[in-house]
Amino acid sequence: MSFHDAANYPVELQVNGEKQFIRVRAADILLYTLRDKLGLTGCKPGCDNGDCGACTILLDGFPMKSCLMLTVEAAGKQLITIEGLKNSSVQYAFARNQAFQCGYCTPGFIMNCQGLLNAEPDAGQETIRLWLESNICRCTSYEEIHQVVMDVFKLKNEG
């Protein structure tokens, strides 16, 4: 075994309901593993320090900024990326209400909002506002995004 091979560790990830077996360096960041090794480019690099939220995924159902996590830390966790979020009322609401412009931040917002719906299904306006503060959009108004989330919660509670 060469030095180069020894620096790569086998990791089993559970991503979007599928087991993925990959080899990573101990220092590999989850964001870049998802993008470069698994081809899941929906989580976007932005600030690379946890400020923007463009790289948000769901980790055991809770929003996590994948730029802040080592790949080896994700072993044994359930990871959902925007590619694995199917039939989500949040996703449909963003599209239906056109709550985006360039779309770069949209997957992160959708994942964060889905996480909020998972964690606090009866969240009120203030809780929603606080959760939305963890993501940044430079193109559109936060009002449209906030309204989309309010609509999703209203529909969920009516249905």
Image (spheres, rainbow, N blue to C red):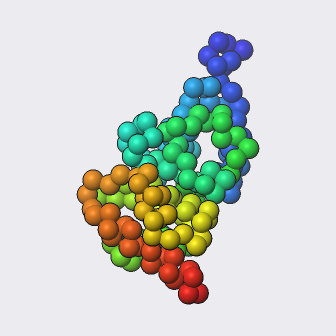
Q: Furthest-top residue in view?
A: 3
**Frontmost residue, 110 versus 147:** 147
Outermost residue, left side: 139
159 or 106, nearer to the observer: 159
Q: In this view, does 44 lie to the left or right of 102?
A: right
Report if residue 126 is visible in the image.
yes
Residue under the point 59% across and 34% down: 70
Q: Position of residue 80 (x, y in %)?
A: 60, 55
Residue 118 position, x and y percent, is 61, 65
Residue at 70% across, 47% down: 77
Taking the spot 64% from the left edge, 57% from the top edge, the residue there is 61
Picture mark count: 0
- Residue 147 position, x and y percent, is 38, 73
At x 39%, y 59%, the residue is: 106
Toward the viewer: 67 or 132? Answer: 132
Residue 121 placement, left or right of 109 = right
Q: Determine if residue 83 is in view.
A: no
x and y percent of residue 71 in the render?
A: 61, 36
Q: Quadrant of residue 58?
A: bottom right
The residue most toward the bottom is 158
8 over 41 or under it: above or below:
above
Rendered view: 73 above or below 127: above
Q: Quadrant of the C terminus?
A: bottom right
Q: Quadrant of the N terminus?
A: top right
